[in-house]
Amino acid sequence: MSVFELETDINSNLDLKRESNSFTRIGGKNQTAQRLMLRLGTGLGEYVYDPTYGLPYLTEIVTGTGLPTKNALSSYLVDEVLGVEGVLGFAEPIIYDYDVTRQTINPTMSILTADGTIETTVL
């Protein structure tokens, strides 16, 4: 998809630079990080142009009551991360931070790319 060649802001909107009145092209580690953010931050069916794009957070990862299991989330994360163009693998195991009070789980990942390592927290 060519849309991934343009830089987006924190809300995944195209980032128009006021001083040059143009969009910024992105590459290298930042491009891979942006692809990861878009891929992991999109629920299955949320992307209008491709309903098969995204993670099945509501249908398969978070089901029933409470938090997803580490195994359920891990299998999807690993497959999705390794499927992102530019990703070579993981620098270390995924760390899962559970907050039972708020019913959240935040995986922290160290991801290897051809251009360096990306540290990211998802969800």
Image (cartoon, rainbow, N blue to C red):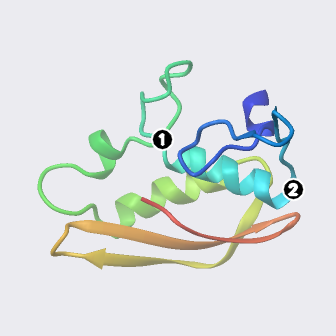
Residue to which mark 1 is pinned: 42
Query: Marks 2 and 1, how far apart in space?
Result: 22 Å
One can see residue 1 in this view: no
Q: Where residue 63 appears, x then y in whole percent?
A: 21, 49
Earlier sequence position, callout 2 versus callout 1: 2
Q: Residue at x 43, y 30 (%)?
A: 46
Q: Where residue 119 appears, x then y in whole percent?
A: 64, 73
The amino acid type found where label 1 is placed reads Thr
Element type at mark 1: loop
Within the image, what quadrant is residue 115 found in? bottom right
Q: Which quadrant of the figure contains the C terminus? A: bottom left
The amino acid type found where label 2 is placed reads Gly
Q: Is residue 5 left or right of residue 34?
A: right
Q: Residue at x 53, y 32 (%)?
A: 53
One can see residue 47 in this view: yes
Q: Which quadrant of the figure contains the N terminus? A: top right
Relative height, residue 4 to residue 29 (above, below): above
Residue to which mark 2 is pinned: 28
Q: Residue at x 77, y 47 (%)?
A: 85
Q: Is residue 28 left or right of residue 53?
A: right
